[in-house]
Image (cartoon, grey):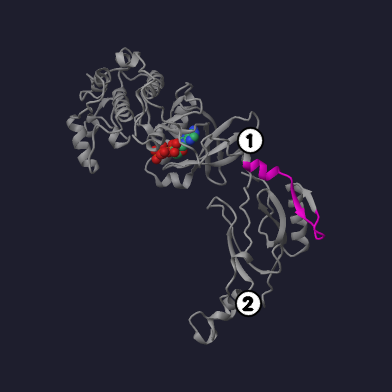
């Protein structure tokens, strides 16, 4: 009995919040069969009920309680993906995480479109300054917008019971920031940067035409689709100019410090809003073409001091035409700073640089997959895949997961909460043991 006992702690679900930790104590009868120990056989239960850990008398010999187990005596089960649906959307893997919540991939089960969902928890939003207002404003803004270079909000689902909100957006494969970070030089070849910059100006011009100041343009908020279309995202701190306002005067700057203009760094009371976006687009252009930032500082005070002075240098290798565009966009005085029209008429904007110079920076792989395949499919496969079970006579029998669930349910009812579990090793499923189930596996519906 001593040698072949093992205690397996297993986290059954990927998602921490919904994780259910099951402690199982087994006797290994053979490689394929485990049976749970009775309470009398189970040293850990015995220890918990009868022993005081500090009382030496209860442990005359510690080796009675901790048993060596050979690694080949432990059977591991591959984690099973739990299919989860939010309304008509099938949930896939995590794409990223921002300060407001997680972003996951989704599949629209009606039209089979790939989507991304931002999952927001009201409790978390309340802890972020202006969190709820920012999200509400973003939803309101995005619902009004429709442009090829601005992220499209497809659907909003609220679950009041769970206090969760799901913002369903078009799917993107990564951000310019992710691409820069994955490249050795931390910049794009000029023809690639030019392609993104012209799309950014198209999207920005549309936002401004809708009287929206984005206020947080930066490579991290510029997403790309698999087709290479740039999408301006994250309108969490954007501001809409009132329809009857006489100009675009703003009073508040909230974006990322390194991309803020001198007027905000210097703390002026009011400033022209659209020129804030021109400045941060200029910093973005500087960053994606040089791999550097025009202004830096060890801390936010030093950074703002540097931005406030407005002095910066452009690396010598930058060609004259791009240099003059950067100088126009990073003009300290917002009233002299380039407008979108001036940018469009600039020689660097109008003439795409030669493609022959260097290779394009690719979109980095997502979880090791450079093809960016849909992550929802494995969940569907695990849910609907037909897999064989090993019968007592050794023959293999194919059952669907629905049937397995039914078997488990019946088994649980008849067998005091014990159910069959299967093991998936290289797509081969087999019955390996009994476990105490807390819930019947199957599709979760939120
Ligand atoms: N539509 C989308 N398609 C694919 N990935 C997305 C999509 N939207 C966001 N992401 C990814 O999810 C992650 C989190 O995005 P999110 O916009 O919530 O936060 P962030 O902008 O990175 O950070 P913060 O909210 O703190 O500014 C990012 O890595 C982003 O690339």
Q: Nearer the viewer, residue 418 or 368?
A: 368
Tag of residue 61: none
Mark 1 sits on what residue? 88
Q: Is residue 130 left or right of residue 51?
A: left
Looking at the image, is 129 positioned above or below residue 283?
Answer: below
Q: Position of residue 102 (x, y in %)?
A: 48, 42
Q: Secondary structure at mark 2?
A: loop
With 409 as the anchor, is 159 left or right in this view? left
Is the shortest distance between ligand 1 and the CB of mark 2 under 8 Å? no
- Residue 304 on the magenta segment: no
Asked if residue 393 lies in the magenta stretch, the reply is yes
Q: Quadrant of residue 46?
A: bottom right
Q: Residue 242, can we see it?
A: no
Q: Earlier in the sequence, mark 2 or mark 1?
A: 2
Give 125 or 368, whichever is nearer the viewer: 368
Q: How would you rate the neighbour count of disc 1 (Cα within 10 Å): few for under 14, some for 14-19, many for 20 or more?
A: few
* Quadrant of the picture in which ligand 1 is shown: top left
Task: From the viewer's perspective, tell me whether residue 87 is left or right of residue 273.
Answer: right
Q: Residue at x 55, y 39 (%)?
A: 158
**Where 186 sits versus 299, above or below?**
above
Residue 136 in the image, given as x and y percentages of width and height: 45, 35
Task: Indicate the secondary structure of the residue bearing disc 1.
Answer: loop
Q: Please give the name of the residue rendered at 45% of the width and 47% of the height, measured from the top-left corner.
A: 124
Quadrant of image for the C terminus: top right
Q: Is residue 403 visible?
A: yes
Image quadrant where one finds the N terminus: bottom right
Q: To which residue does mark 2 refer? A: 2
Instruction: Report the magenta residues as a range.
Output: 378-395
Res 194 → quadrant: top left
């Amino acid at each position: 009995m001593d040698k072949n006992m093992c205690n397996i702690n297993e986290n059954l679900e990927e998602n921490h919040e919904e994780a259910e930790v099951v402690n199982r104590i087994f006797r290994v009868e053979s490689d394929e069969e485990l049976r749970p120990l009775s309470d009398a056989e189970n040293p850990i239960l015995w220890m918990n009920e009868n022993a005081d850990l500090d009382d030496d008398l209860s442990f005359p010999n510690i080796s009675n309680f901790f048993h060596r187990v050979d690694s080949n005596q432990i059977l591991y089960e591959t984690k099973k993906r739990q299919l989860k649906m939010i309304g008509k959307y099938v949930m896939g893997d995590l794409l990223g995480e921002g300060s407001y919540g997680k972003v996951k991939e989704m599949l629209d089960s009606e039209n089979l479109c790939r989507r991304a969902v931002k999952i927001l928890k009201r409790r978390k939003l309340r802890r972020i300054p202006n969190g709820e207002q920012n999200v509400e404003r973003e939803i309101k803004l995005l619902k009004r917008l429709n442009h090829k270079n601005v992220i499209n909000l497809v659907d909003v689902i609220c679950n009041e019971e769970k206090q969760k909100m799901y913002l369903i957006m078009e799917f993107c494969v990564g951000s310019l920031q992710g691409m820069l970070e994955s490249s050795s030089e931390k910049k794009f070849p000029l023809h690639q940067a030019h392609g993104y910059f012209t799309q950014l100006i198209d999207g920005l011009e549309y936002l401004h035409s809708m009287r929206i100041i984005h206020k947080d343009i930066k490579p991290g908020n510029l997403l790309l689709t698999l087709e290479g279309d740039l999408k301006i995202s994250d309108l969490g701190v954007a501001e809409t100019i009132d329809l009857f306002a006489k100009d675009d005067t703003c009073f508040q700057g909230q974006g990322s410090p390194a991309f803020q203009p001198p007027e905000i760094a210097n703390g002026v009371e009011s400033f022209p809003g659209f020129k804030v976006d021109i400045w941060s687009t200029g910093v973005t252009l500087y960053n994606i073409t040089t791999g550097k930032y025009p202004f830096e500082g060890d801390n936010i005070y030093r950074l703002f001091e540097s931005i406030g002075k407005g002095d910066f240098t452009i690396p010598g290798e930058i060609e004259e035409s791009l240099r003059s565009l950067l100088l126009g966009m990073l003009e300290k005085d917002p009233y002299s700073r380039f407008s979108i029209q001036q940018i469009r008429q600039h020689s660097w904007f109008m003439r795409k640089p030669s493609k022959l110079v260097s290779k394009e920076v690719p979109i980095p792989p997502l979880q090791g997959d450079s093809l960016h395949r849909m992550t929802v499919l494995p969940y569907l496969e695990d849910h609907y895949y037909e897999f064989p079970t090993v019968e007592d006579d050794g023959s293999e029998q194919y059952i669907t997961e629905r049937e397995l669930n039914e078997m488990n349910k019946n088994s649980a009812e008849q067998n005091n909460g014990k159910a069959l579990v299967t093991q998936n090793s290289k797509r081969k499923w087999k019955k390996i043991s009994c476990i105490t189930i807390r819930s019947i596996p199957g599709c979760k519906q939120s």
